[in-house]
Image (spheres, rainbow, N blue to C red):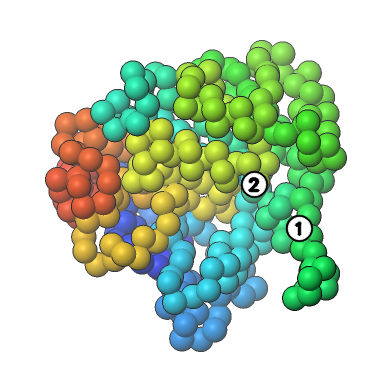
Amino acid sequence: MYKIAVIPGDGTGPEVISEGLKVLEAASQKYNFKYETKVFDFGAERYLKTGKTLDAQDVDELKKYSAIYLGAIGHPEVKPGILETGILLNLRFSLDQYINLRPVKLYDPKFCPLKDKRPEDIDFVVVRENSEGLYKGMGEFKDKGSESETAIQISYNTRCGVERCIRYAFEYTRRRNKRKKLTLCGKTNVLTYAWDLWERVFNEVSEEYPDITTDYAHVDATTMWFVKNPEWFDVIVTDNMFGDIITDLGAMIQGGMGIAAGGNINPSGVSMFEPIGGSAPKYTGKNVINPLAAICALGMLLENLGEVKAAYAIEAAVIKIVRTKLKSLAAGKMGYSTTEVGDLVAESLLK
């Protein structure tokens, strides 16, 4: 019996999560596993009513669950940073979800903005360190508001944090068993303290994995190669900030935010899975948002729980619908409503 905590979130989050849960029910019927869900109201509506984001008791409650299924956090009436820091970063740090896992996979060439790229050319995974770096929130203002004001933002990297991320990436590359190539993405020529640490640890750990080919690319070069030669990549490991940036570019070359899913992973604890695209408030309640990213996130959740056959079947159903039904992956242009796309995936899964 899997216990799944559901955080529908804000904007279109509840709409796409609803379709994901529809697919979860279909998968449980076909692959004979049991689950129960509990919905948590963490998000903008609760914050606007109570001023609360997430407290220690909320986090302790979530630790009792097998996994967390998240819609999206963000609302135009809440100042940017409050919900993101109070809920998203709080969850990642408190639950020690130190890996952000982002598959970048092209399902259909007609939705790719790159010329002549095929599904076999865009099929890689970004392993992003998820608990340190610039997102640690360390820094200060000096002489704030004056002409001599200085803002200091610290990239905080520990040997332990860097090594466990890199080691996870090597293990994932081995388990993925495709090209068995791991690329370190950084900026060693400018950010000489943090990336000296990253590069040294990467090279040391690589000696334990002789079956894995390794290389290095500056982050600016990585973005260039994502566009020019994405087929060069298998698995990429990088820090929190660079990972956040390059995965959005990855989402675009795989077809857009409507298909991009990710996981916040604690390999020995509670992990959280979500669509990447955000709450998209302008589409709220219109039944036009693409739910496939949320459905793919559900597939990742099930794979993480060990329901591998169900996860692969969900991805296969999504690929089938993308290739045979949808006119576009963009909101309002799919040729189907949000709920109809969810129905299509669930029906395909049950056949």
Disc 1 residue crowd, few under 14, some 14–19, many 20+, Cα 10 Å? some
Q: Is residue 241 left or right of residue 231?
A: right
Give the side of residue 293 with respect to residue 246, left or right: left
Residue 303: x and y in percent read 45, 39
Q: Position of residue 280 (x, y in %)?
A: 36, 60
Residue at x-position 41% and y-position 42%: 260
Residue assigned mark 2: 241
Spot the residue most to the bottom: 50
Amino acid type indicated by mark 2: Met
Residue 316 appears in the figure: no
The residue that mark 1 highlights is 153
Mark 2, other Cα within 10 Å: few <14 / some 14–19 / many ≥20:
some
Q: Nearer the viewer, residue 55 or 73?
A: 73
Residue 256 is situated, as x and y percent measured from the top left of the image, at 36, 41
| 10 over 186 or under it: above or below | below
Look at label 1 and name its amino acid. Gln
Looking at the rendering, which quadrant does residue 147 occupy?
Answer: bottom right
**What's the residue at 66%, 36% (across, down)?**
238
Q: Where residue 134 sits: x, y (%)? A: 71, 52
Work out whether mark 2 precedes mark 1 in sequence or the reverse, and give the earlier one: 1
Residue 300 sits in quarter = top left
Is residue 147 something one can see in this rendering? Answer: yes
